[in-house]
Image (cartoon, rainbow, N blue to C red):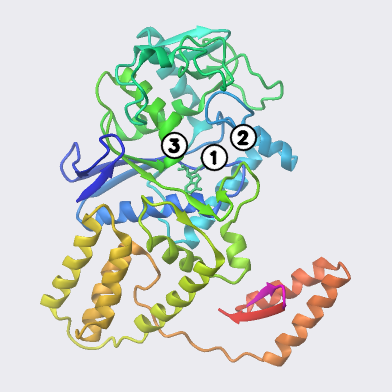
Amino acid sequence: MKLYNTLTKTIDEFKTHEEGIVKMYTCGPTVYHFAHIGNLRSYMMEDVLEKYLRFIGYDVKRTMNITDVGHLTSDADTGEDKMVKGAKREHKTVLEIAKQYTDAFFKDCDELNIRKPDTIVPATSYVGKFIKVIKTLQEKDFAYVSGGNVYFDTSKSENYGELAGLSDNKDDLKVGVRSDVEEDENKKNKNDFVLWFTKSKFEDQELKWNSPWGTGYPGWHIECSCISMANLGEYLDIHCGGVDNIFPHHTNEIAQSEAYIGHKWCTHWFHVQHLNDLSGKMSKSSGAFLTLAVLKEKGYNPLAYRFFCLQSHYRKPLTFTFDSLDNCASAYNKLYAKVSSLDTNGEVDKAKLEEFRKAFTDAMDQDLNTAQAVTVLYDVLKSEANDVTKRAAINEFDSVLSLGLKDAKPEVKKDVDEQKIMELIAERTEAKKNKDYAKADEIRNKLAEEGIILIDTPQGTTFKVQ
Ligand code: AMP
Ligand code: ZN
């Protein structure tokens, strides 16, 4: 299989350290808010990658962290702790916020058919391990204490910045070279980063731990290195994330992991380009973002969004519009109906199935070309093969694409009493007019329980049967 590698900047043959086993690490969500549909694009493409590696015979061991401490609003060492910010916004504790949004994240994943990684580790559960690694880095002279914090010394790291293609001109890396960046006077080099904060800028930092350097809390980058090494060992085959993670997060992970183990750490780096909306990049911190819950409220099937993402290559930025989602949703419904109408009786034509399988793997082996894989799926449906052969092929593809097509059955048409629904819609509109939102929600929920989803549009409310 060939896959683009951010480290080498070429499409490489995918190889593993141990034959037949893939050690895979994914940066998990920062749980201070709902995941937006951009975040979910990254997790969906990583899910396809994991499932495809299994499809071609690898045993995949996958670990993901949950960031519940240490991630500051700047991604570097400035700004506010995102978790504290989330807790303040909702008048809750950091741990309450973490639980709430971790649960919400996995619910989204479930609805998008994203498989849960084998091992999931909240950062706050590993702080003892972080302290041990930081101590070793200090003993090896890769870390220094300054102004109360512990910093990683990037000048000691031989290939610092290789992943991000940073300039290797050492002068550029000195403190104070770029006047537009808020500088931390404690740093020896511009890219040095905090491993452990003791001198918190935040009086109200909620979670703190004792450490050899005083009471404090870990920086963001150290958590992924430690959680990965503790669960997957010293040789990692593939590390995933969105493109914004390349610098500083993954760059710093490489520096500290390799300093700690004393050899190359991870061979392959997989990064998903961003989902944008028409106004630009979708970001959690801006507060204005689309969630899966909003798509569902508007009547979209989450798998129509999965279909939307799979039809574009993971290394291309993707622009989200409701028009394009509408097109995808209607194509998805037609596809589902076609697959569900395939006959289930007869014999599988093994030679044909092998031909289909080859077309699918040819697409996926070329840098995970999911758009081409979807085309292969349509080619199968259009082909002269018998229905059971088509079904067998689509079931196989769906073990990777996870579009809910496996063993699809014709939907049982519900008898709906349209007049009754219209009456309830009118009653709900009246309730909303009177600001009786409890009643309006009650009507919406009651209908939803019967599989009737209300869709609010500027022209009024319509419904669809699920
Ligand atoms: P966060 O919860 O902010 O730590 O991000 C979770 C994951 O989503 C990370 O892998 C990010 O790189 C990725 N990500 C952030 N914004 C986007 C976006 N607009 N499109 C796709 N992935 C994103
Ligand atoms: Zn990470």
Magenta portion: prevailing SS class: strand
Question: Which residue is the extreme one toward the right?
Answer: 434
- Up the image or down, 157 lies above or below 32; here it is above
Residue 418 place in picture, x, y as percent:
67, 90
Regarding mark 3 in the picture, which secondary structure is present there?
helix
Identify the residue position indicated by label 1 in the image: 30
Residue at image x 30%, y 44%? 61
Q: Amino acid at mark 1?
A: Thr
The residue at which mark 2 appears reads as 82
Real-space CA distance between mark 2 and mark 1, rounded to the nearest whole angstrom: 8 Å
Q: Which residues are magenta?
A: 453-459
Residue 245 - label: 3
Residue 398 visible from this viewpoint: yes
Q: In the image shown, does 462 or 354 lie closer to the viewer? A: 462
Question: Does dot 2 land on a helix, a strand or a loop?
Answer: helix
Q: Nearer the viewer, residue 120 or 340?
A: 340
Tell me whether circle 2 and circle 1 mark residues in contact (CB < 8 Å).
Answer: yes
